[in-house]
Image (cartoon, rainbow, N blue to C red):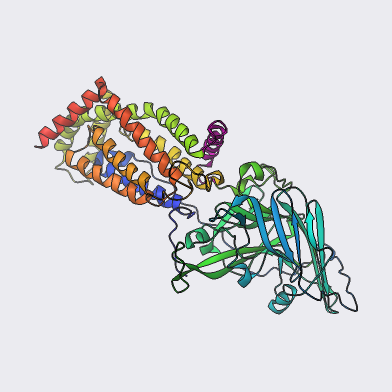
């Protein structure tokens, strides 16, 4: 399977961005060998949880609930022709077909697609190939195909308005099936299914088999995950770690499939007896979405999930809707222990979620006043950048102190340079340097520590904007979608230019002039590559931050501290010449 880079939505992008920043940071530190021994080491990444790939063991008499009998009509119960039933509330409009008793369309009324039409979360490309929502997973492929293509008898037809319910039944003498769906005024549908074959109840898990309707490009498919929660732990499996047909044993508080902005997760009534079958299929998508060509396509993967009890009937709730905190926090999951009993963990704020979540709530508060997500980001960025001014001043002071003791440190190093690195007398040199720093009040990582403190905020903001459903299709100035890349690429260009100006304006008292020139070019270039295709909302944050920092640096350069920094830098350059 080919790998497809996802500059905007790839769930691994946060990790790669962190590695790039870390690499830049280490390059800077590498020019000043004295700091190396004081740098903290990043913790090793934890390995992902192992998947259980075994088929579920047959339920024992002591652990399995008594099977619910499914009545079998001696004369059979089958429909003569295919027909559709539509049920809707203020949030969705679902179209059911009695062929397979599945959902052929599931329109979320409050969200739109790329053509600004109401979004149908049934994947129009993958569903006809691999199955429609609320079809059933059976381990016997032949029986599974029969169950999902049979013509059921529906309890009602035409158009319905929630609250309400629909029951589909099928029987042919050997096989008997019943599906009941109940609807209310939320995004949750209650699902009850039972299948009997030759008089015995068989495992038949309700499933959402083939991704979502907003998945169009290979990048958007790559953002899909299999997700589940047990106790307070939430696991997210990207498509590279999902094997089709594997069974993951529970218990699950909820389990299902998600993409960047939407989710279809099952909430079992009996979490203790729940299992999940993971589904993974290949799919061809156009390489160029603006000019799709059937002959110019790439292969990617579409994910699905089937959830329920093995060896009996099923009763679950199915949430199909947005990954919106306000909505998810209203969905009760009473089986969760030690954590909030709702679906909020579907929103992935990343490693720095403890910072990202408050930032998002603050951003929503800004939006409630300005009613535009772009201006909300502008206001928040301005206040965050102002709040970081003391850290910038502290960094400059530390760098200046380090520059002042550089001659004495160099003299100490000269005295000991004749000794090899393994010579015990090298420890005496380190002790002398440490005593010098203590006497002069110099912290060896003082210039780096403010930068380290800023990094969690930077990554938290990246995670927050990447997970914020509210920015999807939100317009600002010339940008029609703050969750997509800038269509004119103006913000990435502004980011590179402003970063270069900021680097030039900031005195680097402790850095060699030739090294500073290299960093002035390398840093903006690397950031431009990273941010070129990232979300416009994120580019707006960084570009504005740089503009504000230019104004701050202009003022700081005219203070006593700024003048001392420039003088120290000029003296160092003169000595080099």
Q: Nearer the viewer, residue 445 or 433?
A: 445
Q: Percent from the top left, x then y, of residue 322?
A: 62, 50
Q: Is residue 380 above or below residue 57?
A: above
Q: Nearer the viewer, residue 311 or 256?
A: 256
Q: Is residue 551 above or below residue 13?
A: above
> Is residue 376 at least partly visible in the picture?
yes
In the visual, does 463 lie left or right of 159?
left
Kindly indicate the quadrant of the structure image that contains residue 490: top left
Q: Residue furthest left?
A: 577
Kindly indicate the quadrant of the structure image that contains residue 192: bottom right
In the visual, does 58 lie left or right of 362?
right
Is residue 109 part of the magenta span, yes or no? no
Q: Percent from the top left, x then y, of residue 4?
A: 44, 63
Question: Which region of the structure is painted magenta?
Answer: 349-372
Q: Percent from the top left, x then y, of residue 267?
A: 71, 54
Q: Main secondary structure of the magenta part?
A: helix
Q: Residue furthest right?
A: 74
Is residue 368 part of the magenta span, yes or no? yes
Tally of numbered tags: 0
Tell me the quarter of the image containing the C terminus: top left
Q: Percent from the top left, x then y, of residue 92?
A: 69, 53
Q: Nearer the viewer, residue 559 or 364?
A: 364
Kindly indicate the quadrant of the structure image that contains residue 309: bottom right
- Residue in view at x 69 percent, y 68 percent: 56
In the visual, does 403 lie left or right of 321?
left
> Is residue 436 at least partly visible in the picture?
no
């Amino acid at each position: 399977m080919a790998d497809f880079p996802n500059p905007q939505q790839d769930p691994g992008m946060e990790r790669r961005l962190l590695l790039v920043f870390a690499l830049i940071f280490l390059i800077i530190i590498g020019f000043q060998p004295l700091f190396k021994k004081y740098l903290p080491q990043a913790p090793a990444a934890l390995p992902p949880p192992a998947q259980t790939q075994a088929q579920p063991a047959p339920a024992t008499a002591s652990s399995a609930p008594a099977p619910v009998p499914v009545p079998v009509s001696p004369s059979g119960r089958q429909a003569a022709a295919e027909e559709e039933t539509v049920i809707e509330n203020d949030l969705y409009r679902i179209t059911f077909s009695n062929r397979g008793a599945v959902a052929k369309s599931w329109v979320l009324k409050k969200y739109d697609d790329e053509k600004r039409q109401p979004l149908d979360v049934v994947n129009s490309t993958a569903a006809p190939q691999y199955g429609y929502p609320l079809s059933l997973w059976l381990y016997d492929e032949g029986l599974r195909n029969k169950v999902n293509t049979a013509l059921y008898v529906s309890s009602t037809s035409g158009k319905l308005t929630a609250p309400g319910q629909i029951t589909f039944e099928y029987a042919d003498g050997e096989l008997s099936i019943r599906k009941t769906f109940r609807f209310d005024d939320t995004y949750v549908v209650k699902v009850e299914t039972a299948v009997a074959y030759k008089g015995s109840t068989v495992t038949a898990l309700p499933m959402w088999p083939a991704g979502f309707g907003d998945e169009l490009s290979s990048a958007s498919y790559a953002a899909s995950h299999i997700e589940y929660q047990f106790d307070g732990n939430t696991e997210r499996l990207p498509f590279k770690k999902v094997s089709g047909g594997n069974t993951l044993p529970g218990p699950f508080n909820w389990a299902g499939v998600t993409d960047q902005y939407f989710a279809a997760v099952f909430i079992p009534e009996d979490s203790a007896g729940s299992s999940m079958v993971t589904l993974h299929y290949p799919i061809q998508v156009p390489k160029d979405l603006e000019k799709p060509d059937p002959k110019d396509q790439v292969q990617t993967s579409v994910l699905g999930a089937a959830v329920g009890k093995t060896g009996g009937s099923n009763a679950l709730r199915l949430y199909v809707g947005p990954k919106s905190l306000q909505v998810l926090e209203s969905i009760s999951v009473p089986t969760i222990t030690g954590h909030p009993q709702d679906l909020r963990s579907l929103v992935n704020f990343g490693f720095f979620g403890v910072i990202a979540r408050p930032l998002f709530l603050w951003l929503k508060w800004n939006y409630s006043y300005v009613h535009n997500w772009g201006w909300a980001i502008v206001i928040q960025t301005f206040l965050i950048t102002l709040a970081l001014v003391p850290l910038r001043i502290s960094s400059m002071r530390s760098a200046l102190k380090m520059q002042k003791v550089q001659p004495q440190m160099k003299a100490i190093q000269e005295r000991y340079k004749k000794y090899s690195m393994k010579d015990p007398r090298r420890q005496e040199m380190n002790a002398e340097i440490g005593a010098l720093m203590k006497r002069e009040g110099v912290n060896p990582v003082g210039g780096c520590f403010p930068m380290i403190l800023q990094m969690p905020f930077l990554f938290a903001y990246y995670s927050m904007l990447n997970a914020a459903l509210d920015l999807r299709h939100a317009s600002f100035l010339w940008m029609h979608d703050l969750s997509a890349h800038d269509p004119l690429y103006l913000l990435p260009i502004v980011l590179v230019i402003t970063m270069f100006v900021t680097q030039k304006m900031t005195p680097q008292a402790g850095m060699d002039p030739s090294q500073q020139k290299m960093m002035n070019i390398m840093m903006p270039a690397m950031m431009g590559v990273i941010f070129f295709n990232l979300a416009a909302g994120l580019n707006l944050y960084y570009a504005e931050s740089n503009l504000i920092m230019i104004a701050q640096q202009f003022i700081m350069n005219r203070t006593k501290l700024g003048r001392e920094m420039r003088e120290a830098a000029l003296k160092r350059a003169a000595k080099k010449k």
